[in-house]
Image: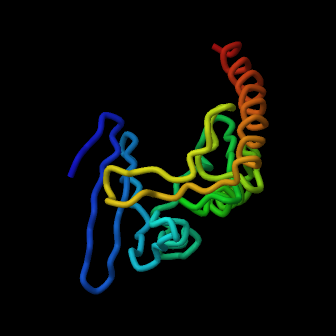
Amino acid sequence: MKTCPTCWRWTWTISRKLPTCYWLTPRYRNLVITPIPSFLEHMQIDVSGAVRLRHYRGDPRDKSNQQSVLPVEKAGGQILFIVGEDDESSNSKEYAKQALDQLRSHGRSNGRMLVYPGAGHLIEPPYAPLCYASRNNHLSVPLLWGGDPAAHTAAQEHAWGEIQKFFRQYLSQARSQL
């Protein structure tokens, strides 16, 4: 087990009956979020040999996984979710939808989502090349991130402008309240 400076802990558990892998146990002050179990048998191998992780995690909407859902309704600030519909690493659109539903169910309106068709997982600042797959320190095979080059590039350019607007709007307000 390794612990990194940001208080995230990597743990791997493989059981004979039910292979599960627990990644990143988030800790913040006294709050510890139990990771949602992942099922190795749900990992898919792409024709390139890269691993697609999109479907291997348990469903966060399942009642048995509710202890693993982040309490986003307690967030004091604004939240901007940026997701690519061609994300091969996680079902990020569904996770963001769930978080927004969770906010609304608690009467909160401090979140919004930008969805980019054809964009993959790694939506970075503009003009960074598309990283469709990459090596990982914890697996012996590359991980698939997804994304169509043209759609992903357009998403990065648009998202960067939206991120800057978001920061100008909400960081300026926060600074004036100090």
Q: Nearer the viewer, residue 86 or 6?
A: 86
Q: Answer left or right for 25 relative to 16.
A: right
Kindly give the residue lying farthest to the bottom in the view shown: 17
Image point 23% across, 47% down: which residue? 2
Residue 14, image quadrant? bottom left
Q: From where the camera sits, is residue 6 visible?
A: yes
Q: Nearer the viewer, residue 43 or 165?
A: 43
Can residue 113 be seen from the camera position used here? no
Residue depicted at x 28% and y 58%? 11
**Colour convention:** rainbow
Q: Is residue 102 left or right of residue 24?
A: right
Q: Is residue 4 left or right of residue 86?
A: left
Q: Where is residue 30 drawn, in percent x and y?
A: 36, 45
Q: Position of residue 66 (x, y in %)?
A: 51, 67
In this image, 116 relative to 26: left or right? right
Task: Give the residue displayed 75% in from the left and 43% down from the top.
Answer: 155
| 91 up-or-down from 178: above or below | below
Name, please, the residue furthest toward the front.
48
| Residue nearest the viewer, comparing 166 with 152 | 152
Residue 123: x percent and y percent? 64, 43
Residue at image x 50%, y 65%? 48
User: Residue 153 at what x, y percent from top left?
Assistant: 72, 41
Q: Splitting the image into 4 quarters, where does residue 160 fall?
A: top right
The image quadrant that residue 29 belongs to is top left
